[in-house]
Image (cartoon, grey):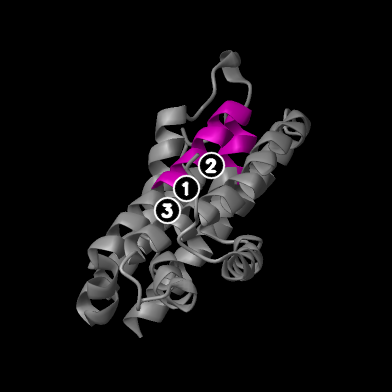
Amino acid sequence: MLAFTLPIDFPTLIAFILTASVIVLTPGPDTLIILRYAISSGPRVGLATVAGVQFGLVGHTILAILGISVLIASTPWLFKAVALAGASYIGWIGVQSFMPHGLLHVGAGGKPPVSAHKAFRDATFCNLLNPKVILLFLALFPNFVDRTRDDVPQQLITLSLTLIIINAVWQAPMALSAELVRRWLKNPQIYKVVMYSTGVMLIAVAALMFYDNLF
């Protein structure tokens, strides 16, 4: 009988879970986008958004294993370019709230205003282009990786899978519970307030990212 052994010892894994959980519970662009699309388009689209965030984390894991994350973080102009691209993308999603044919169509014709494909794509790109996630992989992961061993890629994959599970456990119920909020938003005025508010917050996040990387 074959015994399965984790590439990371149990106490280290528990310490990572506790640390990562605190970070995941801190609201950020991912949380805003999940709530936004779940409220505007229902739980199916909300879960697609959650899946997009996790797919972005898979991309970060691959970049970390290949050493590209280190290259981006250690090259100032490249890091700024990624940060500004992420700020632009997040800002554009926020701006869509104020467009005449944006997201203000809850329950219109029984057709969700945002497709699951678009929600997945937006969440993936926002996560991939978020410089804070790059720094998360560079600042957090090395503290839990033993570089003296020859299984560093396996350790990174284990930590990434753990982070994805923590993310999904927190974000999936958030997307599903947003359906309760959505029922209250049949009133167009209330819905506009909520959508405009999330739009302003996304634009504010983008503005702060621009400020941090241009000044």
| Secondary structure state at the residue bearing disc 3 | helix
Residue at image mark 2: 50
Mark 1: amino acid: Val
Q: Residue at x 46, y 56 (%)?
A: 158
Q: Residue at x 46, y 37 (%)?
A: 119
47 relative to 127, above or below: above
In contact (CB < 8 Å): disc 1 and disc 3: yes
x and y percentages locating residue 103 in the rendered image: 53, 35
Mark 3: amino acid: Leu
Q: Residue at x 43, y 37 (%)?
A: 120
159 relative to 164, above or below: below
67 relative to 50, above or below: below
x and y percentages locating residue 188 in the rendered image: 69, 32
Q: How far is disc 2 from disc 1 in space, using C-alphas?
A: 5 Å
How many numbered marks have been drawn onto this rendered protein structure?
Answer: 3
Between 142 and 52, the one nearer to me in the picture = 142
Left or right: 78 as drawn, with respect to 157: left
Q: Which numbered disc covers residue 57?
A: 3
x and y percentages locating residue 101 in the rendered image: 46, 32
Tell me if I can see residue 92 in this picture. no
Range drawn in magenta: 35-55
Between 178 and 40, the one nearer to me in the picture = 178
| Quarter that holds the C terminus | bottom left
Residue at image mark 1: 53
Q: How far is disc 1 from disc 3 in space, using C-alphas?
A: 7 Å
x and y percentages locating residue 137 in the rendered image: 42, 68
Would you identify the image quadrant in which residue 175 lies? top right
Tell me if I can see residue 170 in this picture. yes
